[in-house]
Image (spheres, rainbow, N blue to C red):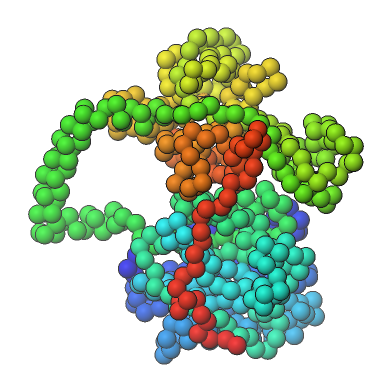
Amino acid sequence: MDFELRIGQASDTGRIRRYNEDFVESFVPADETTLRDKGALFLVADGMGGHRAGGVASREAVQWVKKEYYASTDLSLGESLVRAFERANKAVFELAQENEDKAGMGTTLVAAVILGRRAVIANVGDSRVYLLRGRQLSQVTVDHSWVEEQVQAGLLTREEADIHPHRNLITRAMGTRPEVAVDLYDMEVREGDILLLCTDGLSGQVADRQIASTVRTLPPPQAAEVLVEQADERGGRDNATALIVQLGGPPTRDGLRQMLGSEGGQTLYRRLALGLAALIFACLCALVALFPVLNQRFVGNPRALPQAAPIRFDTVEQGEWAHLAVYLGYTDTNALEAAHPDPSNRGVPSSRDLWPAERGLFLVGAVQDWRCQADRCRFGLAMKGQTFPVHLEPEFLQEGFQDLSGQRVRVFGVQTPGGEVAARLIDRGAPWWAWWQPSWVTIYDRHRWREPVWVFSTVDQNPYSVIEVEEYPALTLGEPIVTRGMWLPGQPGDSMIFEPEDLYQLEAGVYVPVPDEVHFEPLPTATLQPVGGE
């Protein structure tokens, strides 16, 4: 195996389904010969059929493919995988014929084999494989669905397909017919590549940008959990499953110990030690010379103040009104209407300027006038010549930070009707001399993580801002923005992380959507064409 594989998987029933009929499996053979000859196998299936038959179909299909694939020793990787799919299809079909309560059951199935620098992928149905390479997300597989056929024929746009009432109608499945056509893809993989296998309960709920951002910024186990949580937050209309495989990374601890224990390794060790000493000396010199620059990185350098303003929503239709209320954070349509009376009294406006239910502010500045009582602490946050009043509950403040006077902090909080900011998260900037520490460390936390929130902020050059400016070429430093996303806890002792989903920029007193500048380019055509199937 050329790469160390980092794996994460998660599955969730969702909010509507009674049972989880998805099935996921990761198999890395313990036998070195098998691993060298056949590689590691990853599978995701989405079952269908009443009386829990879908769960039976997905489980049977996955287990049959795993068994048959590794039993085949005289065929190529691709041929072995296709034959395993065909035998699994026959087994599921025969099981459905023999049991009346399982009649009509079937399942989607997608599988990936990773061997060295090669990935062989097979699929039937609309469960998908994505490849994240750097910042580019590509869908490797092609859905076997009615809407995908309409898109390929030019009868539907991709945007129309995403919301079409028949978007869940698949045209090919495992176990519904005696024979099945399998699409096969053979591609080269590189160190750092990430494969995501998922069911349509995930891909149909979470946007490509959010998938890419989550998979890129979190370790595979946490990323898989967050993805299925995001699918649930967006309605949870179906079971959602994610299986993430990241290729590459540093050598394992045992491998490093073995290398350094050899004769050549001892020479390498001495060279590394001398090189490390020289590097530390150079870093100390650079730290002294570049102190002002480093200090700016640690404490942030906001060029503007967050500006709270309404968001423009064009062409709001009757059927979208309830969804918009939930999107903005209101409990229901009545709560939205109470906060935003319709001046035309028509009840169904074509466009509106609306506020989120909570005006979250993200601020960076210095603490002034710290005052703390038994149940509440207050301070002023000086930022670009303006002071924001902030209050917090001392019981959520970490020990050792009972007085923040003079500290450089980042604050996320909700602006109250009285104008104060009720803090939910506070980060402290590392002092200039603590160059070995993270730039920001969370010291106050009374927030519920991984829940959608609205945040008014600015485009900042600091690497710990709410957005990564290089992803949005249309924006400029210091520009006011409002974004919907979620806060994620950082690594122990590290800062909080914000994952944006939707982003708006200020124009003429209202916020409008920012054009999506991240292009999800496909892989070279030769690697995307099926080499088997119909």
Q: Residue furthest front?
A: 508
Q: Which residue is rendered at x = 60% and y = 29% of the image?
A: 307
Let me know if residue 29 appears in the view: no
Q: Tell me residue 261's x, y (percent).
A: 16, 56
Q: Which residue is rendered at x = 83% and y = 40% of the image?
A: 333
Q: Quadrant of residue 507?
A: top right
* 339 vs 179, nearest the viewer: 339
Q: Tell me if 339 is positioned left or right of 184 in this view.
A: right
Q: Tell me if 352 is positioned left or right of 513 in this view.
A: right
* 526 vs 36, nearest the viewer: 526
Vertical position of residue 451 compared to residue 235: above or below: above
How many numbered markers are drawn?
Answer: 0
- On the rendered image, what quadrant is the N terminus found in? bottom left
Q: Tell me residue 494's x, y (percent).
A: 42, 35
* 451 vs 322, nearest the viewer: 322
Q: Tell me residue 316's x, y (percent).
A: 78, 47
Let me know if residue 529 appears in the view: yes
Vertical position of residue 303 compared to residue 16: above or below: above
Q: Tell me residue 434's x, y (percent).
A: 30, 27
Q: Which residue is rendered at x = 77% and y = 49% of the image?
A: 315
Q: Quadrant of residue 326?
A: top right
Q: Which residue is rendered at x = 21% and y = 58% of the image?
A: 258
Vertical position of residue 115 compared to residue 273: above or below: below
Vertical position of residue 260 compared to residue 476: above or below: below
Q: Tell me if 345 is positioned left or right of 74 in this view.
A: right
- On the rendered image, what quadrant is the C terminus found in? bottom right
Q: Quadrant of residue 236?
A: bottom right
